[in-house]
Amino acid sequence: MQVSETQWSSQEMAVAKTALKTAYERETASMVKSVREKASEISHVDDLWHLNDFLSARRFDIDGKYDDREEEVLFVLAKLIKEGWLAAADLDGLDSEKLTKMKALTHIL
């Protein structure tokens, strides 16, 4: 079965969506911390514009990253694992075939 043909049960999609929410919360909390640090260092208007550029880029990245469509979720979860926002324990409830595919994808994404 191809990665793009992976079938998801309703229980597995619930696990995937919970994992996506967990990763989103972790990533955005990290970003908030980073923004607080950067904001505390603002001393010139150029620093402010750099912070604005950083936020715009991060929003673009995050808005496009958390795609929960069935045909995309395997790739998204693999990317989040590779980036460190998810761990194996966050994916308890997925079948071993999906976990194996995700592990393989982390090496090529």
Image: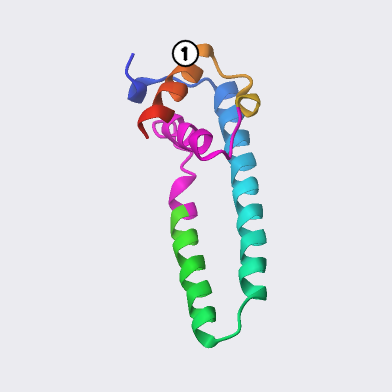
Q: Magenta region: which residues?
A: 62-87
Indicate the position of residue 43 as horizontal and vertical percent values: 60, 84
Residue visible at 44% across and 59% down?
60
Amino acid type, callout 1: Glu
Q: Is 66 situated above or below 14? A: below
Residue visible at 39% across and 31% down?
71
Q: How many labels does the image show?
A: 1
What secondary structure is found at the residue carrying circle 1? helix
| Label 1 crowd bin: few (<14), some (14–19), many (20+), radius 10 Å | few
Residue visible at 46% across and 47% down?
65
Indicate the position of residue 105 as horizontal and vertical percent values: 40, 27
Q: Is 11 situated above or below 28? A: above
Q: Residue furthest bottom?
A: 45
Does the stretch in magenta take in 59?
A: no
- Residue bearing mark 1: 97
Residue visible at 46% across and 71% down?
53
Indicate the position of residue 8 as horizontal and vertical percent values: 48, 21
State which quarter of the image contains the N terminus: top left
